[in-house]
Image: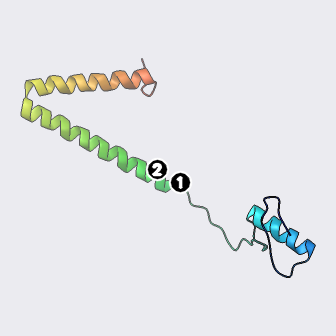
Amino acid sequence: MRSRRNRTISGTFTSTSSHDLATILQYGALPFKVQDIGHSSIPATLGASFLNQTLLAGAIGILLVLAFMLIYYRLPGLLACLALGYYTVAVLQFSGSFPSR
């Protein structure tokens, strides 16, 4: 039997079985039933734990950079720390992530 795209199925098929086979091949379906043998749900605590670890690592990294600037550059480092803090608060307040007074 020929399909719509001029492909040929050869063998000892009846017209109905060759049409069924062409339909199965066309849609990529296999003729078997799917049976659910079990399921489980995973809570989102792994995501919350990862987020907390990420925020802690970020805070530690920022504090290390600020400490380095204070120790190595002294007064200019202090001014850079203050400017960076002001910039951070301004960006967070502008984006709406930080509550305004």
Q: Which mark is residue 65?
A: none
Q: Residue at x 86, y 82 (%)?
A: 12
Image color mode: rainbow
Report the side of 46 relative to 33 (left or right): left
CA distance separating discs 2 and 1:
7 Å
Q: Is residue 94 above or below residue 59?
A: above
Q: Is residue 78 above or below residue 34?
A: above
Q: Residue at x 25, y 26 (%)?
A: 84
Dot 1, how many residues are within 10 Å of its Cα: few (below 14), some (14-19), or many (20+)?
Answer: few
Q: Where does label 2 land, which residue?
A: 48
What quarter of the picture does the N terminus occupy?
A: bottom right
Report the side of 15 relative to 37 (left or right): right
Q: Position of residue 38 (x, y in %)?
A: 67, 71
What quarter of the picture does the C terminus occupy?
A: top left
Report the side of 51 relative to 59 (left or right): right
Q: Where does label 1 land, which residue?
A: 44
Q: Residue at x 57, y 60 (%)?
A: 42
Confirm or deny contact between disc 2 and disc 1 (CB under 8 A). Answer: yes
Amino acid at dot 2:
Ala
> Which SS class for mark 2?
helix
